[in-house]
Amino acid sequence: MVRCLLVGVCLPYLPYQRVEEYLDELSFLADTAGAKEVERIIQKKERLDPAYFIGEGKAIEIAEKCRKERITLVIFDDELSPSQVKNLENKIGIKVLDRTGLILDIFAKRARTREAKVQVSLAQYNYLLPRLTRAWGHLSRQAGGIGTRGVGETQLETDRRVIRKRIQKLKEEIENISLRRNVQSRRRQNTFICSLVGYTNVGKSTLMNALTASKLFSENRLFATLDTTFRKLKGSVLSQEILIVDTIGFIRKLPHSLVASFKSTLSEISNSDLISYLIDVSHPNFEEQFSVVKESLAELSCLEIPTLTLLNKCDIAPESYVSRAQAMFPDAICISAKTLYNIDLLKESIIKEAVKAFKGKIFEIPLDKIEDYNKIKENLTVLSENYGDRFLKVEARGRSEILRKVERLTKK
Ligand SMILES: Nc1nc2c(ncn2[C@@H]2O[C@H](COP(=O)(O)OP(=O)(O)OP(=O)(O)O)[C@@H](O)[C@H]2O)c(=O)[nH]1
Ligand SMILES: [Mg+2]
């Protein structure tokens, strides 16, 4: 494992304890990426330094510490500008990474499917583009521009062109994938979709496995899941199909380039009939984690969708955390995806929501409207069809908006 040092800055409005917790999360991220925290430094500062982010003196202190402890990587909890990274690397003499760079690295390492890989590459190139420009600017300045200007510029232009072309290609590929996805989701219109949503590592995949008797990858690391997966809810007696969707976890300060790239994956959430919010009540900071998720969902325009709040990891959560959470979410269900505590109760609640969302109805469709009816039919669960002299009598279940469409056919 790479030995690393973590750096956090405590600005006047932030409690020190909070910065500690942020660094705990950063340490967890570092561990996921394959780096071990050897030291951490928190600097109290009135304002950030434009050149070094932290103070120059602090940078020298870090350099000494790294030499003494054989540390080879420094990770900052905040996003650094490209020139800050360059200045810090020059001063400290080893690689400097910011939070965004670290998260991108983890995503790149963990992406398995074509779609996840393409989305991560797009985010990486978008991150690289402005950095590439300035890095080259720096090099040609170092040489005083003499003799190298032409070469440097040409190289830079070529690199930028290549990267822009790649970005364009990746965007097209993502477009194609989401187009296919849309077709798929239209076909799924007569199924009830329940998404499991939450901060990273709250137990979404574990719960998915519990609900659907599948064996998705889950582990005590951040961002174990980078794709959305669908599975049928097991044990539902409804004729209605119920699908459970496992999604990517959210995190504080998720890099913008990543959010943009994963838009098509995340937009799956907005197709749901029900969002199950998972909260890890064993985590000291679960309130903030919840608001991060809530904000991200607002950006994806998902706030209108009915929700179910689940307090997960009840088996290991301290009593006081659970009561704090229950006061905050009086309707929430306490569960444990691991010990299966209350999982049957949860299944019933999901089924109840499915019953609410999908109504059954009987229609008499005039025979001259049969063609129109056939077009809508694939979005319904048809229970029976009987031809009469003037009407086709249909008994069907479906989403209310689809039922309204059929209803309109029965009107003159
Ligand atoms: N004790 C306990 N551990 C749990 C519970 N649910 C999940 N875990 C553990 O929490 C860790 C993370 O679980 P995952 O299911 O991978 O979490 P996730 O939300 O899918 O995480 P990402 O995909 O990384 O966003 C694993 O080590 C699980 O075994 C629970 O109810 N109780
Ligand atoms: Mg997962």
Image: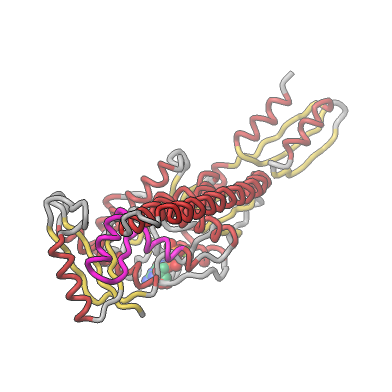
Does 375 appear above or below 147? above
Q: Is residue 200 left or right of residue 395?
A: left
Counting every numbered tag in the picture gives 0
Point out residue 177 in the picture as x, y percentages from the top left corner.
Answer: 62, 51
Residue farthest to the right? 389
Magenta-span inclusion, residue 101: yes
Q: Is residue 376 left or right of residue 170?
A: right
Q: Is residue 307 left or right of residue 138?
A: right
Quick one: 379 or 186, which is closer to the camera?
Answer: 186
Q: Is residue 338 visible?
A: yes
The picture quadrant where one finds residue 358 is top right
Report the predominant secondary structure element of the magenta stretch: helix
Residue farthest to the front? 147
Does 365 appear above or below 94? above
Q: Is residue 26 left or right of residue 126?
A: left
The picture quadrant where one finds residue 316 is bottom left
Q: Is residue 79 visible?
A: no
Residue farthest to the top? 412
Q: What range of the chain is rendered magenta?
A: 81-107
The picture quadrant where one finds residue 42 is bottom left
The residue lying at 66 percent from left, 44 percent from top is 186
Magenta-span inclusion, residue 359: no
What is the basis of the colouring in this image?
A: secondary structure
Point out residue 271 in the picture as x, y percentages from the top left corner.
Answer: 55, 44
Quarter that holds the N terminus? bottom left
Point out residue 410 in the picture as x, y percentages from the top left corner.
Answer: 73, 25
Quarter that holds the C terminus? top right
Does 238 appear above or below 385? below
The residue lying at 17 percent from left, 61 percent from top is 17
